[in-house]
């Protein structure tokens, strides 16, 4: 049993540390995921949405530190109870998401390892079993290192976690796991290879045959069944290839300018997924950057999911000399974790990505 407890201890501890770190690297991204869970269509906890970022940081810091506490053997009773309560909550959440198909990615490992809802649930079930082993055999969790050092290790872990969280909030994630990392060509990221697998569907054809309802399933072709056709329902059997970038566009007045703008030799993009939620300090710093970029031959545009009236009002208020385009809010949130944020592109390839706090680092 001691060997089994030791195995469970290291697996659970390392997974909690890894899961906590990748989410702590991008707390804003995890807060967006929590907002999905808080929405009326999922848990209907909209009153928690304004506190999503705070909740996200507290959750991931506690998750990471719990992993450390388990590995060093600090307060095993508190640690195992905390692990058990957390895994019960997350197992329920991932099952709910998978069964009702509410949230397509739980965000368990951030953008580092995307998991389907059912994969997330199965992962939590395995963790639940391992944590139960630890919970009922906590006497075998022997402390590592001198017990007197444990509280200082845990205190230092908390301080380092909150410091790291503050750093990535004031700048950008230290490690970019998303499809829009620097060096990515957006057009290539949107392309689908010729030999890419295509989605496979079953077609359930419903007929009225001599007064009885009959269903014939095919993979696409219209069946030769006699009878009166009623309707057909499609069922996804196997997903096809989905390009890394599949929801990006730049539109204006209903016209798509994506291809034109991605062919610009020098393009500077101001990204603000929601101008109502944009930070005023960031907006006030943009005009000098825009002016310098234009003087050096850049085409400067703004990308936002906000309405035209708000775009015009913001441009007038902050004297922004740029042309605004529309893009999907989710895509903009994915591109840069800053509102506003800065992107430079050369022929569709991302060359720089900056938080508004780091505008002095912009190289034009």
Image (cartoon, rainbow, N blue to C red):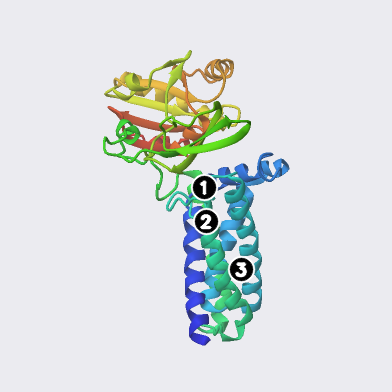
Of residues 211 and 45, which is closer to you in this image? 211
Q: Residue furthest front?
A: 210
- Alpha carbon separation for disc pair 1 and 2: 8 Å
Mark 1 surroundings: few (<14), some (14-19) or many (≥20) residues within 10 A: many
Badge 1 is on which residue? 105
Assess whether mark 2 and mark 1 are in contact (beta carbons under 8 angstroms).
yes
Residue 46: x percent and y percent? 70, 41
Residue 306: x percent and y percent? 56, 23
Q: Is residue 131 left or right of residue 221?
A: right
Badge 2 is on which residue? 120
Residue 302: x percent and y percent? 45, 23
- Alpha carbon separation for disc pair 2 and 3: 17 Å
- Alpha carbon separation for disc pair 1 and 3: 22 Å
Residue appearing at x 51%, y 34% in the figure: 330
Please state the total of marks drawn on the protein image.
3
Badge 3 is on which residue? 83
* Element class at badge 2: helix
Mark 2 surroundings: few (<14), some (14-19) or many (≥20) residues within 10 A: many
Q: Which comes before the other along the chain, label 1 or label 3?
A: 3
Residue 172, by quadrant, is: top left
């Amino acid at each position: 049993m001691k060997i089994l407890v030791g195995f469970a201890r290291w697996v659970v501890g390392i997974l909690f540390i890894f899961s906590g770190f990748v989410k702590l690297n991008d707390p804003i991204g995890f807060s967006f995921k929590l907002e999905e869970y808080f929405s009326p269509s999922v848990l209907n906890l909209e009153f928690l949405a304004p506190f999503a970022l705070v909740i996200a940081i507290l959750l991931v810091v506690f998750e990471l530190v719990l992993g450390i506490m388990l590995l060093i053997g600090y307060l095993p009773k508190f640690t195992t109870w905390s692990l058990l309560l957390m895994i019960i909550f997350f197992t329920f959440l991932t099952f709910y998401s998978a069964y009702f198909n509410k949230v397509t990615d739980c965000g368990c490992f951030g953008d580092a390892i995307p998991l389907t809802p059912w994969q997330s649930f199965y992962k939590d079930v395995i963790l639940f079993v391992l944590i139960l082993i630890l919970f009922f055999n906590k006497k075998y969790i022997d402390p590592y290192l001198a017990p007197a050092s444990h509280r200082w290790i845990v205190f230092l872990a908390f301080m380092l976690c909150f410091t790291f969280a503050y750093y990535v909030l004031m700048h950008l994630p230290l490690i970019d796991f998303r499809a829009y990392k620097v060096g990515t060509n957006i057009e290539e990221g949107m392309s689908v290879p010729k030999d890419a697998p295509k989605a496979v569907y079953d077609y359930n054809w419903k007929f009225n045959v001599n007064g009885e309802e009959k269903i014939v399933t095919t993979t696409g072709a219209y069946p030769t069944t006699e009878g009166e056709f009623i309707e057909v329902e499609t069922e996804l059997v196997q997903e096809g290839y989905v390009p890394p970038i599949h929801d990006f566009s730049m539109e204006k007045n209903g016209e798509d300018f994506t291809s034109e703008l991605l062919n610009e030799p020098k393009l500077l993009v101001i990204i603000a997924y929601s101008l109502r939620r944009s930070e005023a300090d960031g907006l006030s710093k943009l005009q000098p950057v825009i002016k310098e970029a234009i003087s050096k031959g850049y085409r400067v545009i703004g990308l936002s999911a906000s309405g035209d009236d708000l775009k015009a009002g913001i441009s007038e208020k902050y004297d922004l000399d740029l042309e605004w385009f529309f893009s999907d809010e989710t895509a903009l949130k994915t591109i840069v974790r800053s509102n506003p944020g800065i992107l430079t592109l050369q022929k569709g390839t991302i060359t720089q990505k900056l938080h508004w706090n780091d505008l002095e680092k912009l190289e034009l």
